[in-house]
Image (cartoon, grey):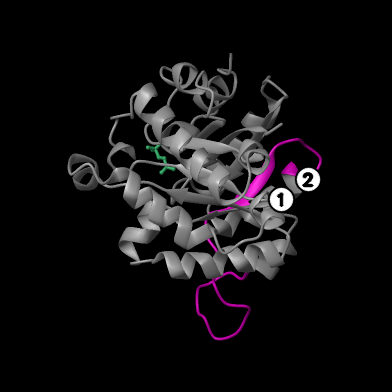
Amino acid sequence: MRIKIVAGNWKMNKSHSEAIELVQKIMASDYDNSVQLIVFPPSIYASEIAKITSSSATALGIQNCSEYDSGAYTGQLSASMIRSMNVKYVLVGHSEIREYFNEQNKTLASKINQLITNDLTPIYCCGEVLQEREKGNHFNLVKSQIEEGLFHLDENQIAKCVIAYEPVWAIGTGVTASSSQAQEMHHFIRSLLAEKYSENVAGSISILYGGSCNPENSQELFANPDIDGGLIGGASLNAVDFIAIANSFS
Ligand code: PGA
């Protein structure tokens, strides 16, 4: 059985004290304990948040990592450093990094290798921009992101990954993919996994939806058979909304 996940990507938001307050509020809330909650704060707060979350079921994640082992890469964090901080999850291939830093699938494949080698769980983001959907090219585009970023992994390694489908046109825009558009793409991704690996492997990988997910639409999205939770941006900056999303599985 795959796990249900609600992950909060705080991006470049929150002061130090606001970040601590937010994680404490999340941990003090009542939520469905069959859901794995993950917070992705700005990395500068990670070591302090790691101490706060260490005794709780809320997991800590990091928003990005380097594709290199170590050395002269100013500003970067290696997977082994992240591993040494009691962190389990790392985002890979978020569309903002793909776009603003021109990150290619090949680089993402190297990052995935770093994470797998260091026993971390990648949350691999994929999704099309609006023009690709309008051209009817969204399935091809997502297929190439999945194939080039992940399909070099063997069956045991891919089973350690989480995938997040985030249509770029829905991120931070207030426009959500409809429940049927999201389910259709999640089902497509799962069928790619089944074809390449097996039904068993495909059935064990959590696929999250991201893009303007909020307490008003999460219930309908999460009711779909191939949607195993959400990667939440804006609505994760407020503990009440984030927890309401975590509590919206039927
Ligand atoms: P959003 O962001 O929920 O603010 O659209 C989602 C994401 O970028 O992960």
Find residue 116 and report its horizontal and vertical position in percent.
67, 62
Label 1: which secondary element: helix
Q: Nearer the viewer, residue 177 or 17?
A: 177
Q: Nearer the viewer, residue 144 or 212?
A: 144
Vertical relation: 62 (above or below) 248: below
Observer able to see residue 213 = no
- Check the image and name the residue furthest to the top: 250
Count of numbered circles in the view: 2
The residue carrying pointer 2 sits among few (fewer than 14), some (14 to 19) or many (20 or more) residues within 10 Å by Cα, namely: few
**What's under tag 2, amino acid-wise?**
Ser
What are the residue bounds of the magenta stretch?
Answer: 53-78
**What's under tag 1, amino acid-wise?**
Ala
Vertical relation: 12 (above or below) 34: below
Label 2: which secondary element: loop
- Check the image and name the residue furthest to the bottom: 72
Residue 152: image quadrant is: bottom right
Mark 1 — residue?
50
Find residue 153 and report its horizontal and vertical position in percent.
61, 61
Find residue 25 and report its horizontal and vertical position in percent.
63, 30
Find residue 34 and report its horizontal and vertical position in percent.
71, 25
- The N terminus - image quarter: top right
Residue 132 numbered mark, or none: none
* Label 1 near ligand 1 (CB < 8 Å): no
Tell whether label 1 touches label 2 (CB within 8 Å): yes
Q: Is residue 218 left or right of residue 168?
A: right
Spatial CA span between label 2 and label 1: 6 Å
Observer able to see residue 92 = yes
The residue carrying pointer 1 sits among few (fewer than 14), some (14 to 19) or many (20 or more) residues within 10 Å by Cα, namely: some
Vertical relation: 38 (above or below) 104: above
Q: Residue at the spot x=38%, y=49% of the render?
A: 142
- Determine if the magenta segment contains residue 62: yes
Mark 2 — residue?
54
